[in-house]
Image (cartoon, grey):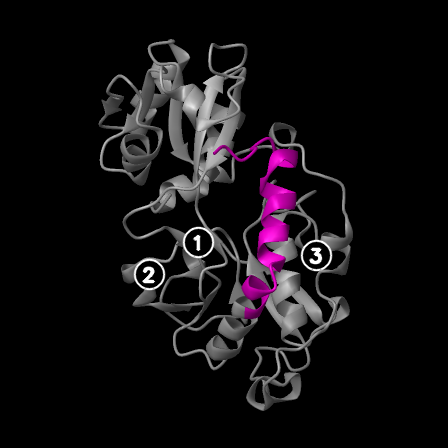
Amino acid sequence: MARPSMLLAIGALAAAAVACAPVDDTATTAGTASPTTSTACAKEQLQLVNAGKLSIGTDKPAFEPWFKDDDPSNGQGFESAVAFAVAGELGFDRTEVQWSTVKFDSAFAPGDKQFDFDINQVSITPDRAKAVDFSKGYYTVKQAIVAVENGKFAGAKSLAELKDAKIGVQVGTTSLDAVKNIIQPADDPNVYNEQIDAVNALKNKQVDALVVDLPTAFYVTAAQVENSKIVGQFSSTGGTPEEFGLVMEKGSPLKTCVDKAVDTLTSKGELAKIEQQWLGSAAGAPELR
């Protein structure tokens, strides 16, 4: 999902496509102030776009499972929950966070920013990092398996059950590496030059399953292949993992503190809990091993 066009396309997935879980303690407590311990990162020391408020940007509409009800401020959905968790680590409570609309491409374009950080499924890449600062990754993109509902492999509960599947995948992607190295099907996968060709192969039942990254899988099932489902998600190994990062203005004085907040949330297991709640089984993407 490194290409901007696909990231934008993911926004097309409608709320009906993914059923998110009701709010639990993870979501309702996100944003409760528990500041990262550092004098330099104390709330009163932070250089903010708007004094006394943490300004967070994202695109509109804000779609599930990243947000819920097109309302980033409600703390529901994966990225809303992450944003409020980071805010809490920086010492801000829910009333001290304000959201603004920032188009996807504008978030990582060169120039001054009117947000303290932006969160919008932006993959960290060297080219983008020339124009903006990224936080440490808050989400490592996983691979997913998409199949037609009621298909032979639609009910697979493990990767081993996919050994005999004819898999479609796009050339030159981390998904192809994952098929070869992790799933290791008995037959070579059908490899396509363009992702749309792989998608059409699934539509036309030329393949049993499609392997794409998880964000793309949400889009495929919502907008591209009727009566399809995410069979499950899995972690891939090898190469440089694709990660989403919080976007900040180049040279942002907040970067060190935001990185500390992400590190703390990672070490406490909070990011893993948020991911499981909003991108796991409740979102239709159970973990396969």
Which residue corresponds to mark 3?
73
The percent coordinates of residue 125 (x first, y second) are 32, 57
In the depicted structure, whether residue 68 falls above or below residue 225: below
Give the side of residue 261 with respect to residue 256, left or right: right
Query: Which callout, 1 or 3, points at the residue further toward the start of the chain?
Result: 3
The residue beneath circle 1 is: 122
Residue 207 visible, this angle: yes
User: How many C-alpha atoms fall within 10 Å of the one at disc 3: few (<14), some, or many (≥20)?
Assistant: some
* Quadrant in which residue 39 is drawn: bottom right
Question: What's the magenta bit mostly, secondary-structure-wise?
Answer: helix
Magenta region: which residues? 264-289
Measured as percent of width and height from the top left, residue 150 is found at: 54, 10
Residue type at mark 3: give it: Ser
Label 2: few (<14), some or many (≥20) within 10 Å?
some
- Give the amino acid type for the residue marked by disc 1 in the picture: Val
Residue assigned mark 2? 128
Mark 1 vs 2, N-terminal side: 1
Depth check: 145 or 204 in front?
A: 145
The magenta stretch spans residue 285: yes
